[in-house]
Every structure is written in structure tokens, then in C-alpha cells.
Image (cartoon, helix red, strand yellow):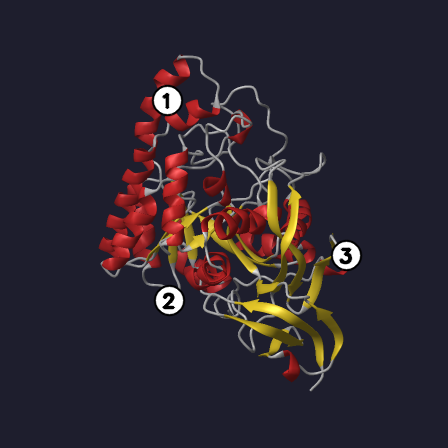
Amino acid sequence: MKADLIIKNARVIDHQAEFFGGIAIKDGKILMVCDNSALPGADREVDAQRRCLLPGVVDPHCHLGVAFPFDEDMRTETAQAARGGITTIFLYIRNLGASYIPFYKERRAIAEQESCIDFGFHFGIQREEHINEIPKIVAETGVQSFKLYFGYEVENPIGIVPATDGWVYATMMQVAKLPKGVVSVHCENTEIAKWIRKDIEASGRQDLGAYTESRPAFCEEETIKRMIFLAERTGCSLQVVHTSVAAGPVLGAEARARELDVTIETCPHYLTRSCYDEDLDMRAKISPPLRDESEKEGLWKAMLNDEIGNIGSDHVPFFPKQGVDIWTEKPGVISFPWELPLLITEGVINRGMTMQQLVNVNSFGPAKRFGVYPSKGSLEVGTDADMVLVDMDEERSVHHPVDGKGYCIYEGMKLKGWPVMTISNGQVIFENGEVTDAAFGTGRCITRPEA
């Protein structure tokens, strides 16, 4: 059988093993994974030249359409994702209206017109009606993942409606009944942080460290413990998102030892930057905040011990940050194009992380957590042909264009291990430094009723 595309002479790597050979693709699916000699003929052949061929990155955590129009973000930012080897994204989206059903239909239709990669949704609980609507949401949208937000005061700069413990408990009781249900929680004790902030804000400090010190690590640790307790009481699967503290993965591991379904997500920024880095100012405000070097290294220890389940970028493109007042500055940065080289440089090259561990947190882990493995996050025969070819020897500095969206905290960093080709559903969507125009509008929604 003739293939549509083959990639040969590659270091083929998944979360379990590595071999030298290639992959054949037909009709958007993986046809063969084999030695070079067994590959069939194809309409197009790509010589990988011994570069690494990995499953496409599954990014379980991003926010699009927050500041810019949703259709615009789905085009510009999925292109940035494709540049970074990301072939599937899950969007945390919030709806202040009473029902998610029309909101889902509208957002899905827009995204399918613009996106160049596959996408799915998590829904934020923003009012009590959303909790009561969960059975209907599952039936009519296929979405089984819901997020609740601590860490935000009622008057916050991005309009998030903060959760209560009652909301969390009620949501978990509903989601525990679902076959693939997951509750994600932003863990920070808002009330404690609010009191600590008063004195620091009154001192007049405007440095990035002041924001971190106003929301100390124990605020996050306390809430993680509380959410694990509620997950145990309800039997609900829990994803602790954007974990910035070293205690988080330890608590997750302890919970799993008690046979609780708890996974820990962290982000590239918590693994690569600290709140006291001299080149960063208030524009590097993120929620939860960047921490100090000890917390960063603690997260790396957990990563190397396989205690972190997945990496989410928490990519959110805001309008240019004001840089005027750290307490009202919008929190969030962008990471799509640099996620892989950041982890390769800081993890694989600098700390001895294996390529299998890299694939585990970047592809297999998030795909399994949100119920789309093995279609996503694998290189198994018959699955979606989503993959990225990485040149481990390519070294260059991060450069975010002046007209690029969002705030980049990696500008000027010299990184090694860059994506050179991205394949989504069997189609080459990124090569020679460019995203092909034909890719836009080909992305599919993977959270849908029939799925």
C-alpha cells in the first residue's frame, strides 16, 4: 500500500522507547512504525537526517479570545503553537452567561474555521447554574472537564468569578459520575493572600518580587491540600493546574499512593524563570506568581522523579502590558513557540531528563489525563498522525516579534532543540520556518458529543 507521507532516518521516540527508523502516514493516520527498510513508497518522503520524531505536543492549558477577538486568536495563536510542535490544545474558557451550550456551539464553529491544529475545551464554573448544567453539557458538547478558580479577589483585573469550597464540592460530586470527568482547580488561598498584600502594597513596592511575596507558596500548598481532601471525599479526578510550588508534586504523589486520581500540571515559566530574575519586571506578572530558585529547582526534582503529570503553557495573549502598577496589571504570558526548546534545554540538556520523560509530560500525560489517548499523544499505528520533528542540535535565541501578541519572558534566551517540522492529522503544517496557509481551518474539535 502506498503511503501519503513517510518520514525516514529518524530517532522515533515515544513515552516508552526509542528506535531508529521511520513512520508512514495515510489518510491522516499512522500506517506503519518500522525500520527504514520496511517503509512503503509514498507521495512524499522526508529524510529526518537522524533528528528526533516525537508525538505532537498536547497542550492542556491555554486561554484564547480573552483580550483579542476569539477568531483572530484561533488563527494567530494556533500558528504559534504549530511553530512550537503543538498539535492539540485544550482551551480553558469562561462564560458568564447561564448556559454553556450556545457558547460552545458558537466557539466551536469559529475555531473550526480558523484553527490549524486540533482543539478541545474545558469549561470554567462561573455561576451556580453551570454546576447544575453539567449533565446537559456532557450530553450536548462532550466536554467532561471543568475548572474552578481560587487566587482571584472579587474585583480582579481579568473578570474571573472566584470559586467557593461549596462550588468545588458540588462540581466534584457531579463530575465524579462521568466516565472521563476531571475537575481542574487554580489553587491559591485568596483570603490569606489578600491580607498579606495589604502591607506590601502599602509599602509602595512595585517589583515582581513584591507580588510573589504577597502570595507566598504556603497559600498555594494549603489549597492543594484542601482540594485533594475534597477529591478524596467525592471520588472525583483532580488536576492541579499551573503548579508553581515544589510541595505540589509531593502532595500529588502522596495522594496517588492512596489510590486517588490526582495529577499535577506545571508550566514552562515556573521551570525556567524566577521572580527575582534581574531582567524581569512587573510585566512578568503571572497567576500564580513566579517563585524563587528553590521552588523552581524543587519542581525540576519532581519532574525528574516523574511526579509531574503534564506540562501546560498557560499561554494567554493580552494587549501590551502597561507596566505601571503591579497590583492592577493583568497576569499572564505566552509560551507556545518555545515550550519544547525550553524543556529540551533546561531539562534534557542541563538536567539529564530523558526524551521519554519529555514525551510523557508533553504528549502522553496530558492526552491520557483528558481522555484522548491514544488518538493523541502517541505514535501508535491507527492513531492520528500528529508529530513533530526536532533538531536537537539547532541553537538560537528567543525572539518575539514586535507585532507579536502577548508578553514573552524568554526574550534573548539561547535555547537548543527546536521544532523544524510539525505534522497534524497527516498534513505538514509547519516547515522551513513557516506555517502553511492551507492549514488554517483544518483543525478539528475533539471535545464533541459523539466522541
- Distance (Cα) linking label 1 and label 2: 41 Å
Q: Quadrant of residue 432?
A: bottom right
Secondary element at tag 3: helix
The crowd level at tag 2 (other Cα within 10 Å; few <14, some 14-19, many 20+) is few
Q: Is 214 in front, or is 84?
A: 84
* Vertical relation: 125 (above or below) 428: above
Residue 67 horizontal side relative to residue 92, left or right:
right
Residue 8: x and y in percent read 67, 73
* Vertical relation: 150 (above or below) 75: above
Q: Amino acid at mark 2?
A: Pro
In the picture of the structure, the residue carrying the numbered disc 2 is 179
**Considering the image in quadrants, where does the N terminus appear?**
bottom right
Secondary element at tag 2: loop
Q: What residue do we see at 67% from left, 71% from top?
A: 7
Q: Amino acid at mark 3?
A: Asp
The crowd level at tag 3 (other Cα within 10 Å; few <14, some 14-19, many 20+) is few
Q: Identify the disc placed on residue 437.
A: 3
* Of pointers 1 and 2, the one earlier in the residue sequence: 2
- Distance (Cα) linking label 2 and label 3: 38 Å
Residue 21 visible, this angle: yes
The reply to whether the C-beta atoms of the residues labelled 2 and 3 are less than 8 Å apart is no
* Vertical relation: 403 (above or below) 353: above
Q: Is 446 in front, or is 201?
A: 201
Q: Residue furthest top?
A: 203
Residue 197: x and y in percent read 37, 22
Residue 20 horizontal side relative to residue 15, left or right:
right
Q: Identify the disc placed on residue 346.
A: none
Residue 123: x and y in percent read 47, 51
Residue 411: x and y in percent read 62, 36
In the picture of the structure, the residue carrying the numbered disc 1 is 197
| In this view, the mark in front (2 or 3) | 3
The crowd level at tag 1 (other Cα within 10 Å; few <14, some 14-19, many 20+) is some
